[in-house]
Amino acid sequence: MNILIKDILALLPEGVSTCSVYISGGTIASTGFAPEGFTPDKTINGSGKMLIPGLVNAHTHASMTILRNCADDLLFNDWLFGRILPLEEKFTGEDCHWGIKLAIMEMLRCGTASFIDMYSFMDDLAQAVADTGIRAVLSRGLVGGSDDFAASEQRMKEALDAVEKWKDIPNLSFMLAPHAPYTCDEGFLREIATEAKRQGLPITTHISESLSEIETIKERYGCTPVELCDRAGLLTDTTVAAHCVHLTDNDISILASRGVTVATNPVSNLKLANGIAPVPKMLKAGVKVALGTDGAASNNTLNMFRELTMLTLIHKGVNHDAKAVSAREGINIATKNGAMALGRSDLGEIRPGNIADLAIIDLGQPNMQPLNDPAAALAYSSNGSEVETVIVGGKILMENREFLTIDAERTVYEVSKICERIGTK
Ligand code: NI
């Protein structure tokens, strides 16, 4: 399908300018003149709108939308072990299918075109990605070790089976996901690292999220979580490490030298009272930083615009430095660096040859006028509700805020039935 987005203010790598964007066969064919022989099947009038790269949510647990607003104002360990895990025990695969569909609706509504997910029930999640057409990297959360050998191996088998079964679905790929250094023993972390290497799979994990994690790992192994993950072989240039809130200078230099991408989750870290990741320090040390929302049980949204605002504000405040993470830097983190987390050099920027993952923003909203500096508008004025159309791989998934591949009413209904059954409603 050929799509022409005509005369739109576009956020290009070289700056913002008004141009026409030609999309053909899923890729951006041109951001200037019409390619030879191009006939649009669909034309979108870009007047009064802005085109941005689709945002990349580099860390979430999409099915946890089911647990939105039901475990709040709790410290991390009370939240996870006291409230979340007992509720998750009640989930079926079908529950997670509806949960991720609701998450995909919310992500599209706020301009997110791709995400990295860690959860379970891989077939039910993969089916939702296939149905909706969004871009996703799924991973089966792996916990366990020698105390729990058979169940750990079963989880690993589920992870690898999904990779094989769903390998031909467009826009879908996989990572291996050791949940965290405090939920996997060192032997299991090592086994996952070896298997990832053997299968050519990237790794995603949680590292150094809470102070209690730092204490636990220090007590068990006499080192930091980053040092443990490094000696287990988990840290490479295709690894995406979520959180990384509590880091030593040595941890930061390990993350930089291994080429790890850190997915920072400022809202979740604040809400669970875990702290604030040293993002400016990491950026200065050359660590690749991307942005994620974490799950809706600890955020309580999957809104990357809210995350972008928090990312660009919070580090100014705590560092007393108004340039700590600039608007433009924040947008790069949410787009281009997100594409790096996905392991993709053909995403995250609007340029010819790249895959067409794009979001169109309505500039007619009062909070977007006068626009003046578009980067400042995206980081500080927007709240995500201005997104009206989202294109993934050259296919329109949401147009004028209508979902074209999701039955929104049924999804909300099914999730509400799940909440009744598990007793959160
Ligand atoms: Ni997480």
Image (cartoon, rainbow, N blue to C red):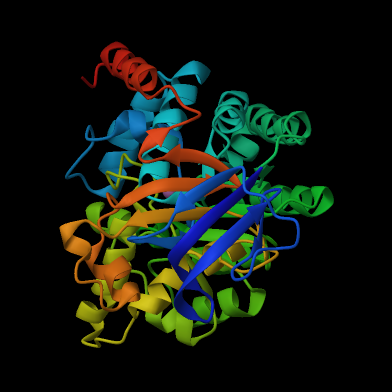
Q: Is residue 165 visible?
A: yes
| Residue drawn at point x = 67 percent, y = 66 percent | 345
Count of numbered badges drawn on the protein: 0
Give coordinates of residue 42: x percent, y percent: 56, 44
Q: Locate residue 333 relative to residue 367 in the image: left or right.
A: right
Q: Which one is in front, 37 or 381?
A: 37
Q: Which one is in front, 252 or 280?
A: 280
Q: Is residue 218 visible?
A: no
* Residue 109 figure quarter: top left
Question: Is 270 drawn above or below residue 330 in the view shown?
Answer: above
| Residue drawn at point x = 26 percent, y = 78 percent | 372
| Residue drawn at point x = 62 percent, y = 40 percent | 145
Question: Is 136 drawn above or below residue 271 in the view shown?
Answer: above
Give coordinates of residue 256: x percent, y percent: 58, 78
Give coordinates of residue 173: x percent, y percent: 68, 44
Quadrant of the drawing holding the C terminus: top left
Question: Is 347 drawn above or below residue 183 in the view shown?
Answer: below
Quadrant of the drawing holding the N terminus: top right
Give coordinates of residue 340: x percent, y percent: 61, 65
| Residue drawn at point x = 47 percent, y = 30 percent | 404
Q: Which one is in front, 317 or 250?
A: 317
* Residue 422 figure quarter: top left
